[in-house]
Image: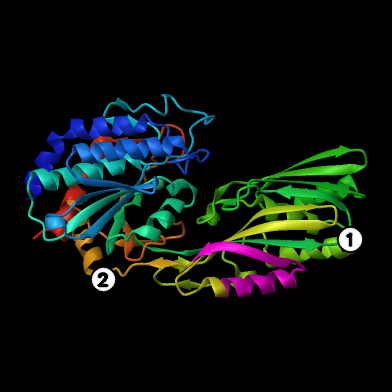
Amino acid sequence: MHEKIKEFIYSNKDFLLSVLDELVSIPSVKGEPVPGAPFGEMPKKALDKAAEICRREGFDTRICRDVVGTADLCPDGKAPALGILCHLDVVPAEGQEGWLTDPFRMIEKDGVLYGRGVIDDKGPLCAALLAMKCVKELNIPLKTGVRLVFGTDEENGSEDLEIYLADEKLPPNVFTPDASFPIINIEKGMMRSRFSGSFENGNIISFHGGSIPNAVPDKAECVIADILLSDIENAVLADKSGARFDIKTADGSVTVKCTGRSAHASTPESGINAVTALISLLCALPLKEGSQTDILRGLERTFPFGETDGTHTGLKASDEKSGALTLVFSIFNMENGSCTGCIDVRFPVCLTLAQVEAAERKALADAGCTFDGYMGDEPHITDENSDFVQKLLKVYERCEGEKGHCIAIGGGTYVHNVPGGVAFGAERGDTDYHMHGANEFITVDELLKDAVIYAEAIAEICGR
Ligand SMILES: [Zn+2]
């Protein structure tokens, strides 16, 4: 069977490339809602195009509430047992420097495909579609069906799935080819919280640091009054954070700019936090005693520079399955007697949102601030010993010729809120495919291999 599938997939390379080309040429970036297109015209146009392709290939195809499309291959109209969840929306490429080709034209050069969406997630979607075409045209006997599900809002919070799930059900087993191989079965929980504080004005006229809630901030800047320049220079000399400080004086105040290194909130160890570095520098200065200074010291105690595991918030935790908790103090603004901030926590499956909230509330109160609320998700876990996951691993090992295993991550994938869901592809190893960046790419060979893996997965799970 493996050889027959492989032969079919490789002889349909042109089909794969032509449908991917059609989809890449639609700049399906989220836009303003218009009637019949809740996420903007372009995601809807991509949805209509994908549905048209699926219909043309003879799959039972529907569009649900203008946001999600489905294409079924089911024997005797039976409910599908397997779902393959992909997305058609992409992140913007406009204004993104470094593109060597038009991001919304698929370019093939030396076996490499370039274009926005070729890895995230239009390429893997086309590989999954080719896999279904393969199973259909080779007449591989099925006992249950498979459903390709293509959404249009993965990049901006997956509201498409919420709308879809209000009316419809996903099959009991779902994989998304929207992350990496072998299999991601555990995704840590996530809490992004806001806090605030108020104080009597002290030396700090203003502090602005970070702008993205889920990233280690690489920039922070503050204006300090009534301070000796030499005190600041000495503090900078003594600083061991690795951040860079640039000092400017004007009108009796001193501006200090701190530059660190950005990193995703799920891997904060690789960043240098400019907010906590600058707070620690301020705490080393002879500031006036008072409530503003108390808050800065409180925040320094609670979120010390260099700490990424939440020790001083009382949150430090880890478990064998999902690894250690990570915490990032990502945004901080202080001006005119008040301050606001943002904290991003990725927590292992041994904790719940309620526990993280309770610990943060207490830690922030100890620092003189108030916890103002959060958005978040509980951890996601799909049993690695389930029949479904074991079958996917078996297919992976057979096709890739290497041992498969399950992975836990700190980020969330498209199946974070899908019970029984796992991520299965399509990134391999340590390759940087420039996902969300300029010159996003995937090789033709990888996409063909993906299609083989997905066809085998369908046969393994749905076959007779
Ligand atoms: Zn994606």
**In the displayed structure, would residue 412 be above or below residue 151?**
below
Q: Which of 125 and 350 is in front in this view?
A: 125
Rendered image: mark on residue 381: none
**In the displayed structure, would residue 247 be above or below residue 99?**
below
Q: Does the magenta stretch include residue 373?
A: yes
Where residue 53 appears, as percent x and y from the top left, is: 25, 37
Residue 25 in sight here:
yes
Where residue 3 appears, as percent x and y from the top left, is: 7, 46
| Disc 2: CA contacts within 10 A as few (<14), some (14-19) or many (>=20) | few
Where residue 418 appears, as percent x and y from the top left, is: 37, 62
Residue 450 in sight here:
no
Residue 315 sits in quarter:
bottom right
* Mark 2 lies on residue: 385
Where residue 425 appears, as percent x and y from the top left, is: 30, 50
Q: Give the mark nearer the N terminus: 1 vs 2.
A: 1
User: Does residue 282 appear to the left or right of 8 in the view shown?
Assistant: right
Q: Residue at x 90, y 50 (%)?
A: 227
User: Does residue 289 appear to the left or right of 62 in the view shown?
Assistant: right
Rendered image: mark on residue 200: 1
